[in-house]
Structure formats: structure tokens, C-alpha cells
Amino acid sequence: MTKILVISPSGEVYDHDCVRWYSHLSFAKAPDHYHNIGDAFVYDSSLKLLNYKALDGINIRNPSDADVERYNSEYSFAVLRGSNYLHPEMDWENAPSVLSRLRIPIVAFGIGAQAPATGKLELTRDARRVLDCIAERCVSFGVRGSYTADVLWSLGIRNTRIIGCPTIFRKNDPTLRIDLPPLDQVRRVGFTLRREVSHDYATDIRRYLALQRDTILELSGRFDLHVVAQGEVEEKKVLWGATEERESAIRQLRKEGWLRGDGDPMETLYRSRLFYADAVSEFEQFVRTKDLVLGYRLHGNLMSLANRIPSVYFTYDSRTTEFVDTFQIPSFNVFGGQAFRLEDYWDQDMFEKFNRAYYQHYRDTRLFLSENKIPHKMVDEAVATARAPRLAA
């Protein structure tokens, strides 16, 4: 019986491999709590690729000796959920001490490094201890892309394998591809929103926000568009709050300049065409109703691609850039100084690059799990090869 020990879970698990946000942090109980539901996408997608009987979250803060012994005796392996862990502000709590006491394999399932806006990435001593501990306890170390692999190489970690993110593989389909319909057949569009940002992620926040707002409004004039949130407090209050909570959120968004009062088309969208869900399955069901999903959210866009829905990324930091480079996803540089035109990206040749990259990295991820002796559901290479003629040459 395979039991998984999860490092850094993100949400409650139900129906074996489905994830939703924690009930004790639900909007009803914690309306001012911000969280990024994209982390739950990664967790949910990871579980859908693995074969296991049961799972549990590791106590990373203060496990007893008995806890650690139970981890080593009852669990087959520990998995670190993919996320953007490698940056100077990451709080590893007591992870270096706890992980060093584990004797079971530890597998990093697509983690990433965040480059600072300026200068060289400097990692804490705790981060380096965690990375060394994982590298010593796995055959291969799963990373998001080349930048992260280079960071680990500079630390002496040589056993990396680039696998991207489990979310793209959540449908477990080795032949997944994007085939563009004619643009004049596109009706229903989702724009993945990210208002909150720091100078560590965006070199010019004014440009970042202005372009995002202008693009949403331009596209809403052409398509049946929804603004898709991923956990922002004000957006949740607009959707789920009582009257005063909703109006308070509107006032705050007006104060920040994101909304601009009566007659503002963005405010109209917020009151009638805003979406958010606390369960990954609900988010996925919504995305599947769209002809196109694009915008600033890495995982929101990724959910659409995983469901064979075209997406265009807006890149603004090393994290988004590394991901589109890994999977060759059509992307627009927010700080490139150009205007965004959807027509420039509605090109099947661009998406054939994604189709090839997806096929290759699906295989790489399957090999990653197999070489680490992790029971999984990913289709073996012989089956994938048999289906390969469906892919463009």
C-alpha cells in the first residue's frame, strides 16, 4: 500500500485526489484571507498523476520523534508540491531539520526559482540545506525550467530534470495539443487577473496594471469576457460578500484606481462578469466553457491549456518567462513596449511549438516519476509513441 507524505500541501483533499481551499479559511470564516488558488491547482494535479492509497501532510513545524519514526515506517515517499520556493523571502520553518531526519525518498515535483528584479538570486542557508537534502534522497530533482536548473547547478546539484508543472498534465493525456479555431469563431473568453504585485515581480508596476486593465477592457468590447480571479480579497468580497462588504471592496478598488466609479466599464465587469471558485474542479469546469483563456496568471492559463483551450501568457517576471520557455507557449512581454494584439498570437505555427514541447515534457515527467520509483498513472512511452502520429511533424 503506497502512502504519500506531502510537504507543503495547499488545500483540503476530498474524493481521494480532489482539492479545495481549507474550510477553516473559507470566505465565510475568513473573508480577509488572501490565498492563491493556483497552488491548489498544482496540488490537485499532482495527486491526479500519482497512484497511492492514502496521503498525509507532514508536520514541518514541530514533529515529535514518534512522528518522524512514523513517517519513516509508514510512508513510501515524501513529495514537495511544486511552487515558487526559491527566493530570499521563503520561510522554510523547521524543514531543514525535519527533512534531514527522513530516510524515505523525497521528490520535488516541479519546483521553481524566482529571479530578483535586479542582481543575483541569493538563497538562505535553510534553502540550501533543504535543496541538498532533497537532492540526496532522489534519483532526479524535478524543476520548472532551465533557470531553476541553472540555480541548482550553481549550488552543485546536478541531478535535475526539467518537467514544468503538473497542472499542464492533469488530464494525463500524452497526445494533448492545441488546435486553433478561426478567430472569428471565438466568443467566450476568460482573462486571468493578477492585480497584486511587488517590485520583485514587476519592474514597472504602473505599466503592469495599466496594460492589464486596458487589455481587459479592449477584449471585453470584442468578446463575451469574464474576469477570472484567483483568490484576491476584494474580488471575493465583490462576488460573495454581503452588501456592505461588496461596496466596501468596490470603494477600495476605486481608491486604488483599478475601478473608476459609475460608468466605468471595468466596474460593470466586476459587478456582472467576475468569476472565482475555491474548488479546483469548479474552476476547471468554468474554464472548459471558454474558447480562449489568457492573461497574467500562470496556473489559470495552464488550466485552460490542460483542457485543450488556447491560451496566451502575459510575461512579467522570471517565473512566467521560464514557464513559457519550457513549454513554448505563445506569450506577450508586458514590459516589451509594444501594444498587445491578439491577432499576432493567433497562429497555429506558434502553438505547434507548444504541442511538441508538451509531448516531450509529458515523457520527461513520466520518466521522472518512474526513475524515482514513484507509482504513477502517466501513460508509458510505448503507448505515447503509438499515439504520436496525431501530432504535427
Image (cartoon, rainbow, N blue to C red):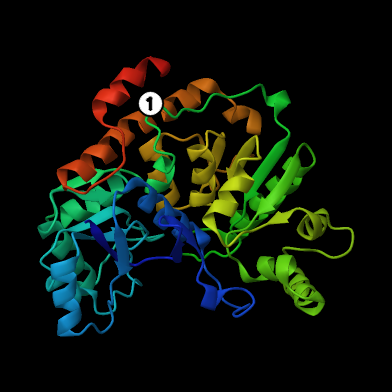
Looking at the picture, does residue 122 appear above or below residue 31? above
Q: How many marks?
A: 1
Q: Which amino acid type is marked by label 1? A: Arg
x and y percent of residue 218 in the render? Answer: 75, 43
Q: Please give the residue where the numbered disc 1 appears in the rendered image.
A: 356
> Is 348 positioned to the left or the right of 382 in the image?
right
| Residue 28 located left or right of residue 5 | right
Residue at the extreme front of the image, as rendered? 1
Q: Give the quarter of the figure containing the N terminus.
A: bottom left
Which quadrant of the structure image shows residue 353?
A: top left
Regarding residue 128, the answer to whether it shows in the image is no
Taking 207 as reference, is 91 above or below it? below
Q: Quick one: SS at disc 1?
A: helix
Can you say whether 206 is above or below 33 in the image?
above
Point out residue 48 in the picture as x, y percentages from the top left corner.
Answer: 39, 48
Q: Quadrant of the C terminus?
A: top left
Instruction: Tell me the residue at 39%/38% (across/down).
Output: 172
Residue 196 x %, y %: 57, 65
Q: At which x and y percent is residue 73?
A: 13, 69
274 displayed left or right of 108: right
Which residue is depicted at the point 29% across and 21% down? 385
Residue 27 placement, left or right of 10: right
The answer to whether residue 96 is above or below residue 55 is below
Q: Quadrant of residue 174?
A: top left
Residue pictured at 56% horizontal, 35% vertical: 309
- Counting other residues with Cα less than 10 Å from the Cα at mark 1, is it few (<14), some (14-19), or many (20 or more)? some
Q: Residue at x 69, y 52 (%)?
A: 227
Q: Is residue 131 visible?
A: yes
